[in-house]
Amino acid sequence: MTYIEGFVIAVPTANKQRFIDHARRGDAVFVEHGALRVLECWQSDVPKGQVTDFFGAVDAREDESVVFSWMEWPDKATRQAMTERMPELMRTDPRFDPEKNPMPFDGARMIYGGFEAIVEHGQPTPGAYVQGFLLAVPDANKEAYRKLAEESWQTFQRFGALRIVEAWQDDVPEGKQTDFFRAVKTQPGEKVVFSFIEWPSRAVWETAAKRMEAEMQPPPADQMPFDGKRMIYGCFESVVELTREGAPASGAR
């Protein structure tokens, strides 16, 4: 299955176009060095939560928007090889030169990490409307969570979703100011899940959301394999999408 490198970023809302331009230049380097796809998604319908949310995950300010993004790699080894090349590329590739391609956001608050896909169905969707999720799941409940996600996909697909990926914590660093662990307030024995669903459009998602609210009954809280109160979720519009020519279709079964 695909190896996912996930990111959440707080970007000044006024810098949206600067962020898009920066991402298009910089993300191309990763595609040239083996990434299958890079998707940058801008805040669309992101609710504030009582316990956790995307805004708190990156200490977002009132004048900032949240970006939910990821890189898809064919495997962990390809991603690791690129990581090892980064010091040299930072010195030699002008797209990583902060003077020629300055970062339009505070990188100190960006959260990132590597995740192994444990559920993957459907095909990457150009111009997707994206539902993004972060969760803390007890390690002992990994299989129960995977099974629940597999079953849920059947419903999401029936309502119009085109792809789902559920990715389990693998190489996720602790940060000085922000990180995935603090984002979902992990407890001992829990792992972080980075998850997304791709829809063909916001309109399809909104129709599906109404149908799910009317037709679906969530399991009782004591039967859920994770603490739903700490789940982070929101909807995002894809603003940058780069793919490697000839890359195999992800999620095909």
Image (spheres, grey):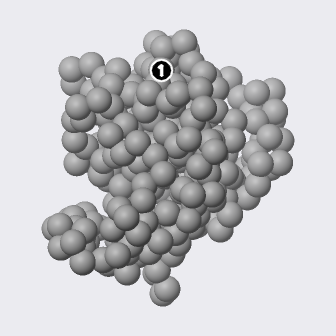
Give the residue displayed 22% in from the left and 48% down from the top.
Answer: 171
* 213 relative to 17 in the view: left or right: right
Give how far across and how far down residue 145 sits, in percent. Answer: 41, 35
Give how far across and how far down residue 202 sits, in percent. Answer: 77, 48
Closer-to-camera residue (65/187) = 65
Closer-to-camera residue (253/134) = 134
Quarter of the rendering containing residue 19:
bottom right
Give how far across and how far down residue 155 sits, in percent. Answer: 67, 43
Give how far across and how far down residue 72 sits, in percent. Answer: 41, 64
Residue 90 visible to an observer of this rendering:
yes
Point out the image quarter for the N terminus: bottom left
Give the residue displayed 37% in from the left and 64% down from the top.
Answer: 99
Secondary structure category for the residue under label 1: loop
Amino acid tagged 1: Thr
Give the residue displayed 33% in from the left and 25% down from the top.
Answer: 182
The single residue placed furthest to the bottom in the displayed view is 246
* 157 relative to 111 in the view: left or right: right
Give the residue displayed 41% in from the left and 48% down from the top.
Answer: 7
Callout 1 environment at 10 Å: few (<14), some (14 to 19), or many (20+)? many
The residue beneath circle 1 is 52
Q: Is residue 14 above or below residue 91?
A: above
* 230 relative to 141 in the view: left or right: right
Q: Is residue 203 above or below residue 22?
A: above
Closer-to-camera residue (26/160) = 26
Q: Is residue 215 above or below residue 169?
A: above
* 141 relative to 149 in the view: left or right: left
Residue 118 visible to an observer of this rendering:
no
